[in-house]
Amino acid sequence: MKMKEDWVEEDFRGHLKMKYKITERLYHKKTEFQTVEVVNTVGFGKMLLNDSLVMVTEKDEFVYHDMITHVPLFLHPNPKKVLIIGGGDGGTAREVLRHKNIERCVMVEIDGAVVDSCKEFIHQTSCALDDSRLELIIGDGVDYVDKCEEKFDVVLVDSTEPIGPATPLFGDKFYLDVAKVLVEDGIVVAQGESPFYNLEMQKKLTEIMSDKFKYVSPYNYSNLTYPGGAWSFIMGSKKYHPTKDLDHAKVGRSGMDFNYYNEDVHVGAFAVLNFVKKELGLNIKM
Amino acid sequence: MKMKEDWVEEDFRGHLKMKYKITERLYHKKTEFQTVEVVNTVGFGKMLLNDSLVMVTEKDEFVYHDMITHVPLFLHPNPKKVLIIGGGDGGTAREVLRHKNIERCVMVEIDGAVVDSCKEFIHQTSCALDDSRLELIIGDGVDYVDKCEEKFDVVLVDSTEPIGPATPLFGDKFYLDVAKVLVEDGIVVAQGESPFYNLEMQKKLTEIMSDKFKYVSPYNYSNLTYPGGAWSFIMGSKKYHPTKDLDHAKVGRSGMDFNYYNEDVHVGAFAVLNFVKKELGLNIKM
């Protein structure tokens, strides 16, 4: 007997659908924040979806996690303390904790179901969540930085789209607090959407950061499962120029090996697409 | 009465489907080479599909056409003659002919129906096909370079996937002929697929080019409608290093304005993703 085919579908603005063939539905929970799902796909391995938007797949998560983590962690000369806001799948923490100089990593994820589902079903990303250097807090990241009196070298805002629970993470007050919890040569990196589809948000976020950080720059990456071609992170850096202050030899000295990241990819990612440059008015040269 | 919804669907290896909502079916023809279709979409404007694979959309064609054209045409100090193999939609010719120094452009497209359908329905790409500097030949590009006794500064292989009519364009004999029709400081750029999905083909193409050109390098771009994240072109250059020999000021002097391309994007595109670097064994530094 032929099994009926099963698919998950990401609907983009009602006119584009991306459908992924699946073999199993592993997890489904409606939380107070969103619907969290884990499925097993034919083409991309295990997949996490929040509110039917693809968050993470085993096949391409290395792209996002390399780029949110290693760009700031190699740019900063000696990061010891990292704060992750969001990132419940664990992939960002995994990459942070690969850096031997990291002494403490705090991760504040709002939705415990994301952590639980990934711990149970997506070990590839959640494998470092029991590391002794990690403090995992299930709570509101906006609240956390508001009340936080600790300082960090790097803050990573590993958030979902600027809808639902992540909305305040794209606001001015949050970045005032982020600047406050960062040391004087600190760096923040935030999930920055697709310039093709969400340039207004990139503009808003770079404007919010621009009076709090010396350098504000989007940088790009491309994975397989986010509709919108080149996606971006937005970096705010209090002291270090995103490419000129990179010690290229540091990457080799680390002894670490990557699937996506290398020194050239670091520098090249800061090439701002011309339509983005015109809109954002950035005059940082790569 | 509510109209029934109509969609076109690109099926990727049976496990991923990209569906585009359409408002009109404008053109449909089964030729000896492929099925050629033009539709009007809700999200991407007019769209050309060959054998149900998205080739061109009005919304994002600038990415591909900027990157296949302006990277070699700004790298070469004074290109006057360009040969395009494929490119029936006309977008590559349009961008080539924007360069005032171009005296002659020959375009050899195998399938007249692609040209006809775009001339009728996609003026955005086909608008330059009547330029007096352009010679448009409906014929076999492989044959053309085999018999050609003319020399070109730049050859652009604007081909579909390495299946169907485009297969010989990914072969050794073709690149022997391309090297023959190029002047001694000539440059070839070829559509190079997605490294995520077709790294084997990139490996084959870079190997084929490597004994015919001094520099062989993939370079990346991302658009909205090709499944596979970062897509690549492969450049073979007889004399000029793809980034070090770029005269950055030439871009400004041209007075041309772009949506995607600029000098930083040119350089940054040659940052080879680490998994590609390992597989291709390229030792060119960006």
Image (spheres, coloured by chain):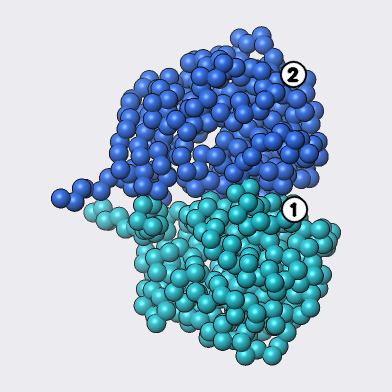
Chain colours: A blue, B cyan
Residue type at mark 2 is Val
Question: In terms of secondary structure, where does tag 2 sit?
Answer: strand
Say what secondary structure mark 1 lies in. Answer: loop
Q: Residue at point 69% right, 32% down?
A: A72
Q: Residues within 10 Å of mark 2 (few under 14, many from 20)?
A: some
The amino acid sitting under disc 1 is Met
Residue B186 found in image quarter: bottom right
In the image: residue B54, left or right of residue A106:
left
* Percent of width and height locating residue B89: 53, 72
- Residue A119 shows in the view: yes
Q: Chain ID for label 1?
A: B
Q: How many marks?
A: 2
Using the image as rendered, state which of residue B168 and residue A21 is in the foreground.
B168
Point out residue B62 in the picture as x, y percentages from the top left corner: 60, 60
Residue at the image point whose x is 74% and y is 18% from the top = A183
The vertical placement of A121 against B257, above or below, is: above
Q: Which residue is mark 1?
A: B286
Disc 2 and disc 1 in contact, CB within 8 angstroms: no
Position in image of residue B29 (x %, y %) = 37, 77
Name the one closer to the observer, B41 or B189. B189
Tell me if A158 is positioned left or right of B188 in this view: left
Of the residues tagged 2 and 1, which is closer to the observer?
1
* Image-quadrant location for residue B257: bottom right
Q: Which residue is mark 2?
A: A183
Left/right placement of residue B249 relative to residue B148 reads right
Residue A176 in sight from this viewpoint? no
In which quadrant is the C terminus of chain A drawn? Answer: top right
Say the numbered circle drawn on residue A101. none
Chain ID of residue with mark 2: A
Which residue is drawn at the image coordinates 61% and 44% (left, top)? A260
Q: In the depicted view, which residue is nearer to us: A264 or B199?
A: B199
